[in-house]
């Protein structure tokens, strides 16, 4: 008995400690968050999701030069001071075929894995089904966005529905999926997002309307790509185009959104939160998040000037191209150039001064003589000149109505071209003509388009007047907004950027000789020596190279299938 | 110990049956070596429970009660059984038992007789390691003491931590550190223990001995037991002290600036600089000024205050300040000797129910800088009480407290780095009482910064005697470590000569150096151990001992700092007296080893363990260990694992056919063991690599509240297959004692395979994040350890002893994923020997007879910058005879003319000791060394003009000129760091890693020499003094080495800002002379 009283507690203690021991070692560093324990509630999911927004460059971050606007100069719209030759990237490296998510990486497989992990975890999070659907929509939205950007750059890429374990070598060394599969999956993703995203989660976050805007952008892209890149033999171009049109239509019908009075409002406002044209914008706040777009446009460094090709694409106020319009006064002087033109031109370039080497105004100089002012704040309300790098806080549009109008019009025109739709005057009036009205340009009519005498002599002979004029409208409206390069790619018009085939894209303003500026025989600024010619190689330059160091990681059999044509 | 237990048990039995009284016997017990009286020795009679102890004079008396014999035992001595005769007074001398087979060795959760050991267990002779040595950190004292236990310090700084390894590198991940336990509690930093409080140290080297501790013990265990009082012992009060003077072993000498500056000029011109300068001082103009100073002012201008126009001047045309006075920088900046002292006081004793041990220690170590030297003060307090509460219950409490104070000048800059960077003409003096912008100014103005660390530990324990042969032991320990670092800077007024054209008296400190920072860290350790020991008596020939129990440990660590710039009064550097913005957060500074620097870490370990010892007739020995181990460092789905080991021994000497050899071969045992353990130490910072960590970051997005979006990144990838590394050790050993136990011999051969070492894998970018860790490779370490000891007594008065230790190992990668077989230093490949150094073989210097075109043809690819090989430059051997010297593709099958030129691992670690005593004198001489070790050292101290035209040391003036073609160094050229051969260690031009300038870090060092004298005086005895010993000890008194440069052979470090790149720009190693006394009442 004594034995029992004495030792039983001891034995019990030992046994209880023994059984408790298993869980005893289940501790982790309190200062670390780990998967899957992190996935507790909706707030955590939301916190996780913010990083996806790094995919939107907007006007850029901090001092960076890699915003969507003005900085992507490899087009026929701008002729920057430094000569840029194809290829875009070398075959050895390409940061976009990488894994990082950061203020400088907007395209990468990192976003895909991040979205896949989120999609895999949401069902286990403690929240209502409505919330689960919304956050799945967020995952699908960003997976679609990133794959869309990757397909634009690389063509078909491996499609991942789930984040694989490293032991799953069939997934790890998965060859590139066909472009068709990837884009069809992107469409499925964005359709999921359209259906399931909330109308509002928080102010200015992605929602149904943003998804619709992205959908119209993606579908227009893919529809035209499939239509024009006939060498790929891709089906369903029309399906994509009608989905682009329908998505745009839904937004156009949505009375929440309305066009701004001024073309410039979207580009130079300190606060876009009340702007009814905005579907999603990137907010910049003093000391919180800034960009340097304005600073670079105020610096003494020569600016990336718009090309002669870009300036000449603007119509005269009568709605006719400069080659036809009696209002056009030639390009001998800057006042002549801008007289009676689309008002958007006045907002896009400085109409009072040409600035170039040997003819610097203030400190400003532009590679083409034309000084971009579209993104500058209103000089009447300006208190200080925002020359400081990483101090600018004008908000950047990401999805806005103007693009949606253009998407609609183009999709409709392409469908008509394919015999799948009849473009109506109402289609034009509801879209491009609203933009023209804002630009002080006469409306586009079907009659005008169908009148062969009104066809621009400089028109691309392969295109109908309808498509040509709608594309012109897109070019002008979205001048320096970062769309042009991919537009050219999807239209299969690489020759627009070829200095031989489109010499105007390598010229600037017509100016008097001053001894220090390089001019061609006709007196136009030549930003580069004659020897610097840009040659577009078809089909090579329609896609970027896959980094060779990455290809070498694959089994030999797959390696041969990895690279893009021509590389 | 087993005998003791048996005695105690039989004593208990006797007490229960009761006994009568008998005749009184008396006696005196001495140490046979030193003839000092032994206090506290137990005298017991076989038939009687009640023993007695000797008093301070070694005297005892006891009732014999008709016993036939009595036994005398004392810790550390061989017990002796003396037959009782008619005599009533017995003079007994006990032999030290440290090396005998009867020695009791502390092993995991118990003790074992050395004779019964089947694993590779070594013990440290604590008296020799810690007694009489001016060492306040036990780790330092252990260096070189145990074959297979390597302890390395990269430099000689007061606070430098040790790299501790048992049997070399265990994994390319983590620290490969052994598990260090003090009284069964993990204690990574041994400096919390006062060496004087240590009773015993065991080193468990093989998996069989260590596996009872589970996954933390993959690379061995160091078991330390601290002292406790002994029962039935009269109070013993001991005091000992030590006063030490320390001086650097070896340092480079500064050169005479006259030839130095000429060489710097020439080198600068050679590199394409038409007018080489330093701080704008044209080197030739400077040289001319120094020559002038030497002839005119050297004999008169000896003071600190510098005279303008003589000791320095301002060039009127350029406004540049020129410094002409030549100093002895070592004399100006460094103390010839630093001082340290230690004092220890302890009181111990015990009645038959209660024993106690109390001790206090103080130590002080001074730093070497003359101005504002750093210093370390340490206070230790230990108290323990053991009580026999009831016949079946013993309880004990032990407390330990250590306060550590490191005071140091604020580091405006890395003082060592700049001390070694500039020549002896740099202005160490003052002008108008103010220093110039050099070390002196910063050190002079630097506020005292302080690191204070309080470590405390309380251990409560109990032993329950459940049955005669069944015990339960439990102890619970709470350890707390609180560290607080207070740092501050402030303005420094000095003459700034850095900006051309002016010499301004100005504040040379930056705004960010005017600050106050408090950094604090708190670590908690709670440890519980509970285990049963059962030693059933089954049969005379079969002995079994069982141990089973549980162990649990939880740790927590929190670190953060608060900092504020702008002190109102730099002499009162407090946060409330600053005006800047307060910043702070988690800190990586001062975070204990193995902890995450992110601020708050937790870990927990637990295990169920068991051990069975079986022997048949003390001849066939078998031990089986197992532990079901849990660790928070293991993968969440796999946190528990079983690790087992087994070992066996065969004592040949116990066989009857061996008995006739007994006088010569007293003992012979062969043993073998194998065990496998998981290694959980796979990161350096405690982050858990098995978890998919998610880190916070900011998104480039403004939320609706107008703030930046704080977001959380995607989880890191962790392979589903990721397992811990597995470490299997096979060990064969032989223990023998020959010549009547006078000579002992232990040899171990082992093979340790570390399998599944963790490395990040390389995956295509489409994976979406960096390649996760996988269990990528294996390596194998094979080695051996040998130790020999001898004891011999000549007559009554002379006792001699000696020992030899030798250990060696080599580690080879047996599997590694490196498909290209790159030999880059950052890569491994199958077949690579760990630590190998690739380089060129040096042929000779080029001479003027070498054709420049053929030089360019053969070595042109190796040139960098403006350097062109020519006469006086290094000619490397064209090993593959392809007409050019290069590194090929830097792969194993295409390595051009590269070859393995050496290995940076210490090989053939050896030690030997001889000593003895005669009458009251004792002598102990301990040598320690490394047989082979190569080092590719970089930086100016190792290779002339590594960086730029900064300095040449005295030894570096031995460079090539046409008239001096057999020089040590090539024709000077500045800037030799970045080479053109990929994957190689740094070095270029004349200093690619090569045979000629590879350092040889082999050495033989007189680690310690101790001479003592025990005063044996009746007067002292009458005054109650039982022992008084005076001693002198020298540390590192001499060293035999051929390093190749004037650096200590143990130096591998380059200091704070130099890192490993600037070898030797850091605290030097010391030799020391110390003396002290040991006094017992």
Image: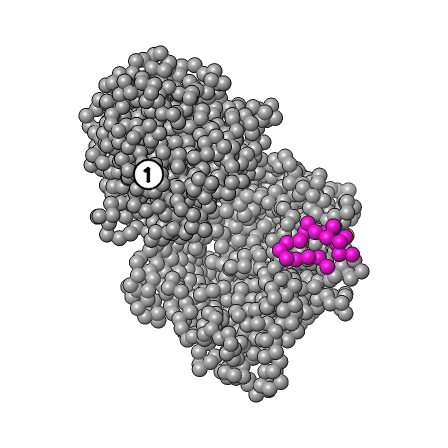
Residue at 56% across / 40% down in the picture? B211
* Res. A10 visible in picture: no
Rendering coords of residue A71 (x, y %): 39, 40
Q: Chain of mark 1?
A: A
Rendering coords of residue B460 (x, y %): 41, 51
Residue at 64% across / 40% down in the picture? B822
Residue at 66% across / 57% down in the picture? B867
Which residue bears the numbered disc 1? A337
- The answer to whether residue B993 is magenta is no
Q: Nearer the viewer, residue A166 or A532?
A: A532
- Which class describes the residues within 10 Å of circle 1: few (<14), some (14-19), or many (20+)? many
Residue at 42% across / 41% down in the picture? A524
Instruction: Give the residue furthest to the top.
Output: A419
Q: Is residue B184 above or below residue B849?
A: above
Instruction: Give the residue furthest to the right.
Output: B849
* Res. B492 visible in picture: yes
Give the magenta-colored segment's residue range: B851-870
Rendering coords of residue B315 (x, y %): 52, 77
Q: Is residue A460 above or below residue B156?
A: above
Rendering coords of residue B64 (x, y %): 57, 58
- The answer to whether residue B858 is magenta is yes
Q: Is residue B137 above or below residue B708?
A: below
Q: Residue A254 vs residue B135: left or right?
A: left
Q: Nearer the viewer, residue A498 or B288?
A: A498
Q: Residue A543 vs residue B2: left or right?
A: left
Q: Quadrant of residue B245?
A: bottom right
Look at the numbered disc 1 and give the secondary structure of its residue: helix
């Amino acid at each position: 008995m004594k034995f029992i009283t004495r030792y039983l507690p001891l034995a019990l203690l030992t046994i209880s400690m023994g059984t408790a021991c298993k869980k005893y070692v289940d501790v982790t560093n309190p200062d670390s968050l780990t998967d899957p324990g992190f996935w507790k509630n909706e707030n955590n999911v939301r916190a996780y999701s913010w990083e996806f927004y790094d995919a939107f460059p907007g006007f850029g971050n901090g001092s960076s030069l890699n915003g969507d606007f003005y900085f992507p100069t490899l087009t026929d719209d701008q002729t920057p001071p430094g000569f840029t030759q194809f290829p875009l990237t070398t075959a050895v490296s390409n940061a976009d075929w990488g894994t990082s998510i950061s203020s400088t990486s907007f395209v990468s497989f990192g976003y895909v894995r991040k979205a896949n992990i989120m999609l895999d975890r949401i069902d286990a999070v403690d929240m209502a089904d409505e919330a689960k659907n919304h956050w799945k929509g967020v995952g699908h939205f960003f997976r679609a966005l990133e794959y869309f950007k990757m397909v634009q750059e690389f063509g078909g890429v491996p499609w991942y529905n789930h984040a694989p374990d490293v032991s799953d070598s069939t997934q790890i060394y998965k060859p590139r999926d066909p472009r068709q599969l990837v884009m069809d999956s992107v469409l499925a993703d964005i359709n999921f997002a359209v259906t399931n995203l909330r109308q509002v989660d928080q102010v200015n976050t992605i929602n149904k309307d943003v998804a619709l805007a992205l959908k119209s952008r993606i579908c227009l892209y893919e529809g035209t790509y499939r239509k024009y890149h006939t060498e790929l033999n891709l089906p369903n171009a029309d399906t994509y185009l009608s989905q682009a049109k329908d998505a745009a239509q839904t937004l156009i019908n949505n009375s929440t959104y309305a066009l701004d009075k001024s073309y410039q409002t979207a580009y130079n406002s300190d606060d876009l939160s009340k702007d009814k044209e905005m579907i999603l914008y990137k907010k910049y706040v003093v000391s919180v998040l800034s960009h340097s777009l304005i600073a670079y446009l105020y610096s003494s460094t020569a600016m990336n000037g718009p090309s002669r090709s870009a300036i000449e694409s603007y119509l005269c106020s009568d709605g006719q191209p400069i080659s036809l319009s009696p209002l056009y006064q030639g390009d001998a002087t800057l006042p002549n150039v801008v007289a009676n033109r689309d008002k958007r031109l006045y907002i896009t370039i400085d109409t009072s001064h040409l600035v170039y080497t040997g003819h610097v105004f203030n400190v400003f100089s532009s590679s083409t003589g034309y000084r971009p002012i579209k993104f500058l704040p209103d000089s009447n309300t300006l208190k200080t000149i925002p020359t400081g790098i990483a101090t600018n806080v004008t908000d950047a549009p990401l999805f806005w109505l103007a693009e949606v109008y253009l998407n609609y019009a183009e999709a409709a025109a392409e469908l008509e071209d394919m015999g799948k739709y009849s473009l109506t005057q109402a289609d034009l009036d509801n879209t491009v003509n609203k933009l023209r009205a804002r630009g002080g340009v006469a409306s586009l009519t079907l009659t005008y388009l169908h009148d062969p005498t009104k066809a621009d002599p400089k028109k691309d002979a392969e295109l109908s007047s309808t498509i040509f004029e709608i594309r012109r409208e897109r070019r002008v409206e979205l001048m320096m907004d970062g769309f042009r390069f991919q537009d050219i790619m999807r239209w299969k018009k690489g020759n627009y950027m070829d200095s031989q085939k489109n010499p105007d894209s390598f010229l600037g303003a017509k100016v008097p000789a001053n001894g220090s500026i390089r001019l061609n025989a006709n007196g136009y600024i030549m930003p580069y020596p004659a020897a610097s010619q840009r040659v577009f190689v078809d089909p090579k330059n329609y896609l970027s190279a896959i980094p060779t160091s990455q290809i070498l990681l694959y089994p030999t059999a797959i390696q041969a299938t990895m690279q893009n044509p021509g590389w | 110990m087993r005998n003791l237990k048996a005695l105690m048990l039989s004593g208990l039995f006797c007490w229960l049956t009761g006994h009568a009284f008998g005749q009184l016997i008396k006696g005196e017990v001495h140490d046979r070596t030193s003839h000092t009286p032994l206090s506290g020795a137990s005298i017991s009679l076989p038939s009687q429970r009640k023993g007695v102890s000797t008093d301070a004079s070694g005297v005892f008396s006891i009732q014999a009660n008709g016993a036939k014999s009595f036994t005398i035992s004392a810790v550390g001595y061989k017990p002796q059984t003396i037959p009782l005769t008619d005599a009533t007074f017995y003079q007994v001398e006990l032999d030290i038992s440290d090396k005998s087979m009867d020695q009791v060795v502390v092993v995991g959760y118990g003790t074992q007789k050395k004779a019964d050991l089947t694993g590779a267990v070594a013990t440290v002779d604590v008296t020799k390691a810690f007694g009489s040595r001016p060492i306040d950190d036990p780790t330092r004292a252990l260096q070189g003491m145990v074959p297979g236990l390597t302890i390395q310090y990269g430099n000689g700084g007061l606070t430098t931590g040790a790299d501790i390894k048992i049997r070399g590198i265990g994994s390319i991940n983590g620290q490969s550190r052994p598990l260090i336990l003090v009284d069964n509690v993990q204690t990574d930093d041994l400096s919390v223990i006062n060496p004087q409080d240590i009773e015993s140290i065991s080193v468990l080297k093989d998996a069989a001995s260590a596996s009872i501790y589970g996954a933390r013990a993959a690379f061995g265990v160091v078991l330390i037991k601290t002292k406790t009082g002994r029962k039935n012992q009269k109070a013993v009060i001991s005091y000992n002290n030590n006063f030490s003077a320390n001086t650097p072993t070896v340092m480079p000498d500064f050169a005479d600036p006259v030839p130095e500056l000429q060489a710097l000029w020439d080198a600068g011109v050679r590199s394409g600089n038409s007018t080489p300068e330093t701080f704008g001082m044209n080197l030739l103009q400077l040289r001319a000024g120094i020559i002038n100073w030497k002839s005119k002012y050297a004999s008169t201008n000896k003071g600190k205050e510098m005279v303008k126009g003589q000791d320095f001047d301002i060039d009127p045309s350029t406004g540049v300040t020129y410094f002409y006075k030549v100093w002895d920088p070592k004399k100006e900046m460094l103390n010839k000797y630093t001082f340290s002292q230690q004092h220890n006081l302890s009181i111990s004793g015990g009645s038959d129910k209660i024993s106690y041990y109390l001790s206090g220690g103080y130590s002080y170590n001074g730093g070497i800088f003359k101005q504002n030297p750093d210093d370390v003060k340490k206070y230790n307090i230990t108290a323990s009480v053991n009580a026999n509460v009831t016949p079946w219950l013993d309880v004990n409490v032990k407390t330990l407290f250590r306060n550590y104070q490191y005071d140091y000048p604020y580091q405006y800059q890395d003082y060592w780095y700049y001390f070694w960077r500039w020549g002896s003409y740099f202005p160490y003096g003052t002008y108008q009482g103010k220093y110039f912008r050099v070390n002196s100014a910063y050190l002079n103005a630097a506020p005292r910064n302080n690191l204070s660390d309080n470590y405390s530990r309380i251990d409560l324990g109990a032993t329950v005697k459940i049955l005669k042969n069944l015990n339960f032991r439990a102890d619970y320990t709470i350890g707390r470590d609180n560290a607080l670092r207070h740092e501050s800077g402030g303005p420094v007024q000095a003459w700034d000569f850095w900006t051309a054209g002016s010499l301004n008296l100005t504040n040379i400190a930056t705004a960010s150096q005017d600050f106050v920072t408090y950094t604090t860290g708190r670590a908690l350790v709670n440890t519980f151990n509970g285990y049963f020991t059962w030693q059933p008596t089954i049969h005379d020939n079969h002995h079994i001992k069982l141990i089973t129990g549980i162990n649990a440990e939880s740790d927590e660590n929190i670190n953060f700092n608060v900092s504020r710039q702008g002190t109102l009064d730099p002499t009162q550097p407090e946060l409330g007296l600053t005006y800047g913005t307060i910043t702070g957060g988690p800190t990586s500074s001062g975070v204990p080893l193995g902890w995450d620097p992110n601020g708050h870490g937790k870990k927990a370990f637990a295990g169920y363990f068991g051990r069975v010892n079986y022997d048949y007739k003390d001849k066939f020995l078998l031990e089986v260990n197992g532990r079901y181990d849990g660790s928070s460092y293991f993968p969440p789905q796999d946190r528990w694992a079983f690790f087992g080991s087994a070992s066996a021994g065969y004592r040949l000497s116990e066989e009857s056919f061996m008995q006739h050899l007994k006088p010569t071969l007293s003992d012979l045992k062969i043993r073998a063991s194998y065990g496998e353990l998981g290694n959980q130490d796979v990161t350096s910072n405690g982050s858990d690599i098995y978890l998919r960590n998610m880190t916070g970051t900011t998104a480039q997005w403004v939320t609706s509240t107008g703030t930046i979006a704080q977001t959380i990144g995607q989880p890191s990838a962790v392979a589903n297959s990721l397992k811990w590394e597995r470490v299997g050790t096979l060990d064969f050993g032989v223990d023998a004692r020959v010549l009547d136990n006078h000579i002992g011999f232990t040899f171990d051969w082992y093979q340790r395979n570390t399998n599944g070492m963790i490395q990040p894998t390389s995956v295509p970018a489409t994976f979406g994040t960096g390649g996760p860790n996988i269990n990528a490779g294996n390596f194998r370490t094979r080695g051996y350890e040998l130790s020999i000891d001898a004891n011999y007594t000549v007559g009554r008065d002379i006792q001699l002893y000696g020992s030899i230790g030798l250990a060696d190992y080599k580690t080879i990668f047996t599997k590694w994923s490196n498909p290209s077989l790159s030999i880059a230093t950052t890569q491994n490949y199958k077949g690579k020997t760990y630590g190998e150094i690739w380089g060129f073989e040096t042929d000779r210097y080029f001479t003027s007879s070498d054709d420049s075109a053929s030089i360019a043809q053969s070595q042109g690819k190796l040139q960098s910058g403006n350097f062109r090989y020519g006469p006086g430059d290094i000619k490397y051997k064209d090993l593959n005879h392809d007409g050019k010297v290069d590194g090929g593709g830097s792969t194993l099958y295409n390595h051009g003319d590269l070859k393995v030129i050496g290995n940076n691992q210490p090989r053939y670690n050896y030690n030997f000791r001889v000593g003895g005593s005669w009458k009251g004198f004792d002598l102990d001489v301990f040598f320690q060394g490394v047989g082979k070790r190569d080092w590719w050292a970089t930086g100016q101290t190792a290779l002339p003009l590594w960086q730029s035209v900064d300095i040449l040391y005295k030894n570096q003036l031995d460079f090539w000129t046409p008239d001096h073609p057999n020089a040590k160094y090539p024709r000077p050229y500045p800037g030799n760091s970045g080479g053109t051969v990929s994957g190689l260690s740094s070095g270029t031009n004349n200093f690619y890693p090569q045979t000629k300038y590879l350092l040889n870090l082999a050495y033989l060092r007189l680690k310690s020499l101790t001479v003592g004298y025990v005063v044996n005086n009746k007067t002292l005895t009458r005054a109650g003094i039982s022992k008084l010993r005076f001693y002198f000890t020298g540390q590192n008194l001499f060293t035999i080495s051929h390093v190749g440069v004037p650096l200590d052979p143990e130096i591998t470090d380059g200091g704070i800002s130099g890192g490993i790149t600037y070898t030797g720009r850091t605290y030097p190693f010391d030799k020391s002379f110390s003396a002290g006394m040991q006094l017992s009442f």
